[in-house]
Image: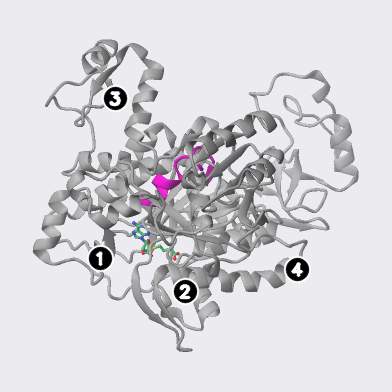
């Protein structure tokens, strides 16, 4: 039986494995600070392998640099001893929903999700603090100089956390923001599918830095677009220079060559632009625009596409050839779906009608524009007003209409996972549920939001002490509204979510140095699991550890008086009872799960542990058995 560790994966070790994959000869063994043998890279050999491509020492090079960059890269790789603890009371449809709401710092969340969601996410949308000087930027504790700076300037929050206003007076105004973003973007990239995409909202303050940072993390070749969002229609008497009406959404693909054509359903708003007034028309099949039936020069010559079409004043021949076969063109003609347009010379050209709805009545899809100008900040504010009766509960939530556009274009299929690492008021979750109800699909969401303290009091007197609480309530209220629509359509869609809170690991840290170990701690060490942690807490740590998705359905049952969890119909069976009888071990083995896990201390003796192993080998040899 394998005993589990308590840290998130060591990403430096994983990077070394990747290098070993490419250049096995450069990976060697060395001793770490504690004298343990570890794998290491022989840079002299690697340099040889890349002889013409290595930039040495202080030589000038093209790159984005700032003080703290190296520490930020290190922060991305450093393992953490944390876990995700499920909270039933803060969840809706806990056992069956595929949606997750993770409360905590997103850097920790990203590390915890590295195994379970590696290469699985289709769309990441993030709306980080824009570094306006008034918003809060989370200071990671890896930058020692930052901590000193904070201590000096007394910028710790009341609860001692490191959420500080990054004012321009701070000499590291841009550096701190970049250091916050860099490790998060690196880790976020790992979670994307090959055809996955990240969209990052930003305004002018950090747009250039963000673009350069994304170029570095995702590769400039994976740049998709820099969308302009026209966020308000006017106003701005306060402005000294131009009336600034827009912000940006930078879009990068994990691998642009794997990304399919992007299209969105043409809605009533977008149709006004797609079917421009010049060629917008209506007939019994609704709005359409026209397109010449004449083939372009790039099309191979095909004699069967050269024929006459009877027009208003006699046969019309193509200059070269038509796009459609004779049968298709004549059928369209009979159905009134060809249009004859007179040119200046008086000759007729033939046009086809492209309808907004296809023959089956489905809305046609078309290329989205790089400027979004039919949905405004005010819509986002109105949505909060509608849900909470108060517009001031959250500053500038993104309108769901804008997010639905992104979801429809970039996560168009059922099952596409959408992740938001700066969930704020939960607009992305709201937009995703609304989109799912509209197009009858289930795409799961993962929201991450830290419990940023904020005393939010509604007009009704309801209080939210932090943003994560508000965000969950927004999702609940939005879901309740959508439920009505859902029932009227072909629902039921998934309108629940599972709340998981980031906390210290469930396991006692046995790796503490001797002088940090106190007497009462020694007693606790006898049991490797911290007091107060439930079986379900352990279950989620095991899911993370095994790289299983955190949204898998969980069924609880009792076997011989012990609580047993069955995950995803036998993908994993877990029993964390203080003691397990041979009967329980056998009953679990007889179910033939892919994986089984027990509490290490549940076995009275080494003999009992070996016995259990033996039972599995006989009854269900394919089961992978572990203890924690
Ligand atoms: C600009 S707001 C996002 C607004 C959101 N798009 C909406 O429409 O409501 C950024 C949010 O990220 C949160 N945040 C900042 N740093 C974070 C971190 N390190 N981990 C998790 N959340 C963070 C803040 O609390 C804030 O609510």
- Side of 193 where 108 appears, left or right: left
Query: In this rendering, which labeled residue sits more in front, label 4 or label 2?
Result: 4
Secondary-structure class at tag 2: helix
69, above or below 324, in the image: below
- Region rendered in magenta: 107-122
The residue to which callout 4 is attached is: 487
Q: Where on the picture, by quarter, is residue 318?
A: top right
Identify the residue at image location x=88%, y=37%: 330
Are the two marked residues, 2 and 1, in contact with CB atoms closer than 8 angstroms? no
Query: In this rendering, which labeled residue sits more in front, label 2 or label 1?
Result: 2
The residue to which callout 2 is attached is: 381
Label located before the other in sequence (4 or 2): 2
Disc 4 crowd, CA 10 A, few/some/many (<14, 14-19, 20+): few
Residue 36, x across and y down, in percent: 25, 27
The residue to which callout 1 is attached is: 241
What whole-number distance in Å separates the C-alpha atoms at marks 3 and 4? 58 Å
What whole-number distance in Å separates the C-alpha atoms at marks 3 and 2? 54 Å
Are the two marked residues, 3 and 2, in contact with CB atoms closer than 8 angstroms? no
Residue 38 image label: 3
Dot 3 beta carbon under 8 Å from ligand 1: no
Disc 1 crowd, CA 10 A, few/some/many (<14, 14-19, 20+): few
What whole-number distance in Å separates the C-alpha atoms at marks 2 and 1? 26 Å
What whole-number distance in Å separates the C-alpha atoms at marks 4 and 2? 27 Å
Dot 2 beta carbon under 8 Å from ligand 1: no
What whole-number distance in Å separates the C-alpha atoms at marks 3 and 1? 59 Å
Disc 3 crowd, CA 10 A, few/some/many (<14, 14-19, 20+): few
Split into quadrants, the picture shows ligand 1 in the one at bottom left
Are the two marked residues, 1 and 4, in contact with CB atoms closer than 8 angstroms? no
């Amino acid at each position: 039986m394998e005993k589990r560790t308590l840290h998130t994966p060591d990403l430096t070790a994983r990077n070394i494995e990747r290098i070993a994959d490419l250049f096995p000869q450069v990976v060697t063994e060395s001793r770490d600070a504690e004298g343990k043998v570890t794998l290491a890279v022989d840079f002299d050999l690697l340099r040889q392998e890349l002889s013409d491509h290595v930039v040495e020492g202080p030589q000038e090079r093209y790159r984005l640099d700032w003080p703290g960059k190296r520490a930020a890269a290190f922060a991305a790789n450093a393992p953490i001893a944390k876990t995700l603890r499920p909270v039933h009371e803060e969840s809706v449809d806990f056992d069956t929903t595929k949606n997750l709401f993770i409360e905590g710092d997103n850097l920790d969340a990203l590390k915890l999700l590295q195994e379970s969601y590696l290469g699985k996410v289709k769309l990441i949308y993030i709306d980080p603090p824009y570094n306006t000087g008034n918003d809060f930027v989370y200071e990671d504790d890896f930058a020692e100089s930052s901590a000193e700076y904070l201590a000096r300037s007394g910028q710790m929050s009341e609860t001692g956390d490191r959420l500080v206003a990054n004012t321009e007076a701070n000499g590291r105004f841009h550096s701190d923001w970049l250091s916050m973003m860099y490790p998060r973007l690196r880790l976020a990239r790992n979670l994307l599918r090959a055809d996955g995409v990240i969209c990052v909202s930003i305004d002018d303050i950090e747009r250039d830095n963000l673009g350069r940072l994304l170029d570095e993390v995702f590769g400039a070749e994976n740049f998709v677009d820099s969308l302009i969002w026209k966020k308000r229609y006017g106003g701005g008497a306060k402005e000294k220079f131009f009336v600034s009406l827009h912000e940006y959404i930078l879009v990068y693909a994990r691998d642009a060559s794997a990304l399919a054509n992007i299209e969105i359903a043409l809605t009533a708003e977008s149709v006004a632009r797609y079917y421009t007034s010049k060629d917008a028309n209506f007939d019994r099949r609704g709005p359409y625009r026209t397109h010449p039936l004449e083939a372009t020069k790039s099309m191979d010559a095909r004699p069967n596409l050269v024929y006459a079409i009877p027009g208003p004043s006699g046969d019309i021949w193509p200059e070269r050839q038509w796009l459609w076969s004779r049968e298709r063109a004549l059928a369209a003609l009979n159905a009134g779906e060809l249009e004859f347009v007179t040119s200046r010379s008086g000759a007729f050209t033939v046009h086809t009608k492209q309808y907004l709805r296809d023959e089956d009545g489905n809305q046609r899809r078309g290329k989205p524009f790089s400027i979004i100008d039919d949905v405004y900040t005010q819509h986002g504010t109105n949505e909060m007003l509608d849900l909470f009766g108060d517009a001031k509960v959250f500053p500038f939530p993104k309108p769901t209409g804008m997010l639905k556009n992104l979801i429809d274009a970039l996560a168009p299929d059922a099952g596409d996972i959408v992740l938001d690492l700066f969930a704020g008021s939960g607009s992305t979750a709201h937009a995703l549920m609304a989109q799912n109800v509209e197009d009858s699909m289930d795409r799961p969401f993962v929201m991450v939001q830290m419990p940023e303290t904020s005393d939010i009091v509604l007009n009704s007197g309801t209080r939210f002490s932090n943003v994560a609480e508000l965000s969950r309530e927004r999702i609940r209220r939005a879901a309740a509204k959508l439920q009505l629509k859902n029932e009227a359509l072909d629902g039921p869609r998934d309108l629940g979510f599972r709340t998981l809170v980031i906390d210290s690991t469930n396991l006692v840290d046995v790796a503490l140095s001797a002088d940090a170990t106190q007497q009462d701690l020694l007693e606790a060490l006898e049991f490797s699991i911290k007091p107060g942690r439930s079986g379900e807490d352990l279950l989620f740590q095991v899911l993370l550890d095994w790289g299983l998705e955190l949204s898998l359905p969980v069924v609880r049952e009792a076997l011989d008086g012990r609580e047993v969890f069955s995950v995803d119909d036998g993908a994993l069976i877990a029993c964390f009872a203080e003691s397990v009888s041979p009967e329980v071990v056998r009953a679990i083995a007889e179910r033939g799960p892919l994986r089984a896990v027990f509490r290490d201390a549940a076995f009275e003796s080494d003999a009992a542990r070996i016995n259990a192993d033996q039972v599995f080998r006989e009854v269900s040899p394919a089961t992978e058995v572990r203890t924690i």
